[in-house]
Image (cartoon, rainbow, N blue to C red):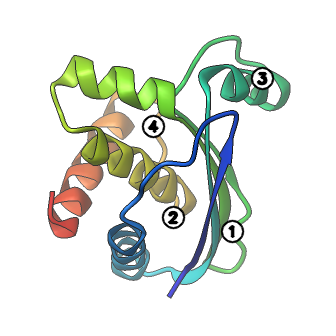
Amino acid sequence: MSKIEFYFEEIEPLKLNRKLIQQAVDFLVENEGKLPGEVSVIFCSDDYLLKINEQYLHHDYYTDIVTFDYVENSVISGDLFISVDRVEDNAGQLGVDFDKELSRVVLHGVLHLVGYKDKTDEEKVVMRGKEDFYLVKAGF
């Protein structure tokens, strides 16, 4: 079982279904043939994540997630910085439940940790398909 730690920066703590997130991440990691490790999920504000995005990736724009990959020898390890503001906006624009969109973004970050990319249109299609697959498996 992966060790998942949750943190909150510049926002109030969220009520999370930690068990559901844990199960979804564990299933994803196992199904993708990787070994469980440690993942930190840092929920934060838009401005907090913008600073991270600028400082480490040199991107001057808001985003829903920035993933730092520390994977070694197929053992999953990383930090997922997630803007709750972006997730709320995306959920509203897409007409989906906030919890589902939040879970999608967490899974998106873990998919990066297991090796998926989303730079090209082709990669984005594969990534979205994987997100949808694991959301269904998680019960969404």
Q: Position of residue 36 (x, y in %)?
A: 55, 83
Precedes in sequence: disc 1 or disc 3: 3
Residue at the spot of label 3: 51
> Where 62 falls versus 29 (above or below)?
above
- Using the image, tell me which numbered label, if any, was put on residue 118: 4
Residue 35, by quadrant, is bottom right
Q: Measuring 25% from the left and 47% from the top, which residue is drawn there?
A: 100
Q: Dot 1 corresponds to which residue?
A: 71
Counting other residues with Cα less than 10 Å from the Cα at mark 4, is it few (<14), some (14-19), or many (20 or more)?
some
Task: Categorize mark 2 by other alpha carbons within 10 Å: few (<14), some (14-19), many (20+).
Answer: many
In the rendered structure, which amino acid carries the disc numbered 3?
A: Lys
Q: Amino acid at mark 4?
A: Asp
Residue displayed at 76% across by 30% down: 52
| Closer mark to the observer between disc 4 and disc 3 | 3
Asked if the residue under mark 1 is in contact with the one under mark 2, i.e. CB atoms within 8 Å, the reply is yes
In x, y percent, where is residue 26?
A: 41, 78
Q: Quadrant of residue 69?
A: bottom right
Amino acid at pointer 2? Val
Say what secondary structure mark 3 lies in.
Answer: helix
Residue 23 location, x and y as percent? 35, 77
Q: Nearer the viewer, residue 76 or 39?
A: 39
As rendered, which of 84 and 13 lies closer to the eye? 13
Residue contact between numbered discs 3 and 2, judged by CB atoms under 8 Å: no
Residue corresponding to mark 2 = 114
Q: How many marks?
A: 4
